[in-house]
Image (spheres, rainbow, N blue to C red):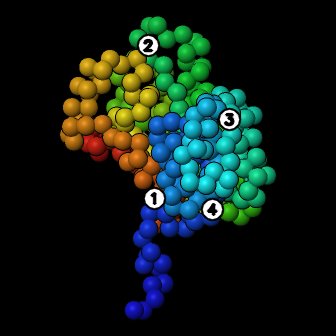
Amino acid sequence: MPSDPTGFSDLSIGKGLEDRVVIVTGASSGIGRATALLFERVGARVCATARDGEGLESLSAEMKDSSRHLFLTVDIEKSKECEGIISRTFEHFGEMLVLAHVAGALRRKPLYEVTEEDWDYQLNVNLRAGFFLNRAAGRAMIERKIPGRIINFTSTSWMMGPLYGSDAYVAAKGGVVSMSRGFARQFGPQGIRVNVVAPGQINTPMQHVGNSPELVAAAAAASPLGRMGEPDELARVTVFLASDNASFIHGATINVSGGTLLY
């Protein structure tokens, strides 16, 4: 069989990720945890970060060889800790290829009950942290001439608008898309791909925050697929975007909502 100069003879989901270093934020539960586990399965070395130290210990126990990975308990609401994630990753591994910024926070409240502290917390965790993480990761990649990949997480609500008391959260998630497009323009010429994943209703702890079981079930049933998504389904999209197979996807926001959002 003739050789394939494009390299597309290898279509494995984790093409190009074996033994490379990947940062996954929010790795203690939900989508972040599933993503960290899938990156390990395709052979990557993972720097898993979260505020929940016990959750990271549980993740470490679930991994096949935790000695290949790094687990950092950090609070990304503090911008210095965001930048520290990047520096500590390079100190430990000596390299880094991918930042998968999954972490987020939601407080559901009726519009007129949202406090200034609620607003600041959700904007800090969901938007400000991403800015400082992306900037630090991009700078480190550019300095070392690494054609890296940055994958941020928004929500389909960035386009649909807030539901069920998520006004501050949705404002931040809309900012994630605009922020990522800015980084895509600035980092693209350096060979760094920046993309965004927009989950719909996914069966994670956040999905149940402030929602009754009846409301969650009704919202899932209203989806064209008649169900919520699972964290593994988002992990697969994230790993694909990080892989060599997504080499010409840049500046995109990928809708993974099971048809709840159609565009």
Distance from the alpha carbon under mark 4 to that under mark 3: 21 Å
Distance from the alpha carbon under mark 1 to that under mark 4: 14 Å
To which quarter of the image does residue 64 belong?
A: bottom right
What kind of residue is marked 2?
Lys
SS for dot 4: loop
To which quarter of the image does residue 144 belong?
A: bottom right
Dot in front, 4 or 2:
4
Image spot of residue 142 (x, y percent): 71, 58
Q: Is residue 212 above or below residue 53?
A: above
Is 167 left or right of 93, judged from the image as shown? left
Distance from the alpha carbon under mark 3 to that under mark 2: 28 Å
Q: Residues within 10 Å of mark 2 (few under 14, many from 20)?
A: some
Q: Is residue 165 above or below residue 128?
A: above
| Circle on res. 109 | 2
Label 1 sits on residue: 240
Q: Nearer the viewer, residue 192 or 96?
A: 96
The residue shown at (63%, 51%) is 66
Distance from the alpha carbon under mark 1 to that under mark 2: 35 Å
Q: Nearer the viewer, residue 233 or 185?
A: 233
What kind of residue is marked 4?
Arg
Mark nearer the N terminus (4 vs 2): 4
Label 4 sits on residue: 20
Q: Is residue 189 above or below residue 118?
A: below
The residue shown at (76%, 46%) is 88
The residue shown at (67%, 30%) is 75
Label 3 sits on residue: 73
What kind of residue is marked 3?
Thr
Mark nearer the N terminus (1 vs 2): 2
